[in-house]
Amino acid sequence: MKHCFRKDDAIMFDYDLTRTKRKTVEVVVFRNGKVGVKAPYWMSRPVIENFLSEKSAWIQKHVGKAEEQNADCQPKKFADGETYFYLGNEYTLKTGKQTDRGVRISGKDLLIGGAFTSSDERYRRLEKWYREKAKEHIAERVRQISEQTGYVPNRITVKTQRKRWGSCSSRRNVNFNWKLIMLPEKVIDYVIIHELCHLKEMNHSKAFWGEVERIMPDYRQYRKWLKDNAGKVEWE
């Protein structure tokens, strides 16, 4: 449910409130600049808003940062000359052979078959290619990291997740955003390790982060990269 947080009679920011069985309040600023709040069913609105008041400087800082990053991201037209990312590397979109209906990388170019004429058709073909590559890469890395750590999920799903890069359910199923394939390989590994560690610690406790660090000692730099740069490589 959407609410407005006010301070000194001024609207500071809007936020989406979700009630769950949790014991504490959690606030997150998503990549699109929107604010999400999770709170226990029993907690009153005044208590929640007191928490938001205490966190307002932090929230506004991160909202501003997200908006600044989004301002640098112009909507794609899926036209020749635009740049796209794959595994952290930048490629220039170019039209390939007229008879070619596929998508492939050639040097620093991302070639798309010339049989596609409209931007909608090019968009659909590119997304299909990215999704296929994401499923292949993520499935293989999950397999390898699972063998290394012993954390084996019941099921792996690669899909659209507008607000998350990954998630882990109580049924030991892990989900990943297909747009991960645009990010550097080490950053993808960090997200995978993060979700697999939830198979042991279904929280973000000290023990959880300790396990992430045990597996990936330098995870902090990839976590920071994700926060600072992820919006720059996305389409939307």
Image: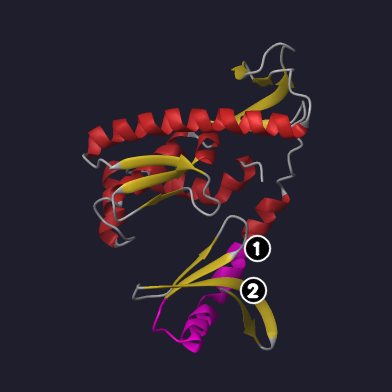
Using the rendered image of the protein, determine whether residue 193 is visible from the camera's viewpoint: yes
Q: Is 153 situated left or right of 52 in this image?
A: left
Q: Nearer the viewer, residue 116 or 221?
A: 116
In the image, residue 170 lies at what x, y percent?
30, 56
- The residue at the point 57 percent across, 76 percent down is 56
Q: Which mark sits nearer the N-terminus, 2 or 1?
A: 2
Q: From which residue to which does the magenta span run?
A: 40-63
* Residue type beneath disc 1: Gly
Circle on res. 13: 2
In the image, residue 23 lies at what x, y percent?
34, 76
Instruction: Tally the numbered discs.
Output: 2
Q: Is 118 situated left or right of 149 in this image?
A: right
- Disc 1 designates what residue? 64
- The residue at the point 68 percent across, 33 percent down is 123
Q: Give the answer, above or below, for where 204 lies relative to 179.
A: below
Circle on res. 113: none
Q: State the predominant SS element of the stretch in magenta.
A: helix
Classify mark 1: helix, strand or loop. Answer: helix
Which of discs 2 and 1 lies nearer the camera? The answer is 2
* Residue type beneath disc 2: Phe
Query: Rounded to the nearest whole Å, what is the CA distance between mark 2 and mark 1?
Result: 11 Å
- The image quadrant of residue 41 is bottom left
Quarter the N terminus occupies: bottom right
Residue 5 inside the magenta-drawn segment? no
- The residue at the point 30 percent across, 35 percent down is 145
In the image, residue 52 lies at what x, y percent?
52, 78
Q: Residues within 10 Å of mark 2 (few under 14, many from 20)?
A: some
Q: Nearer the viewer, residue 42 or 89?
A: 42
Using the rendered image of the protein, determine whether residue 88 is visible from the camera's viewpoint: no
Classify mark 2: helix, strand or loop. Answer: strand
In the image, residue 204 lies at what x, y percent?
34, 60
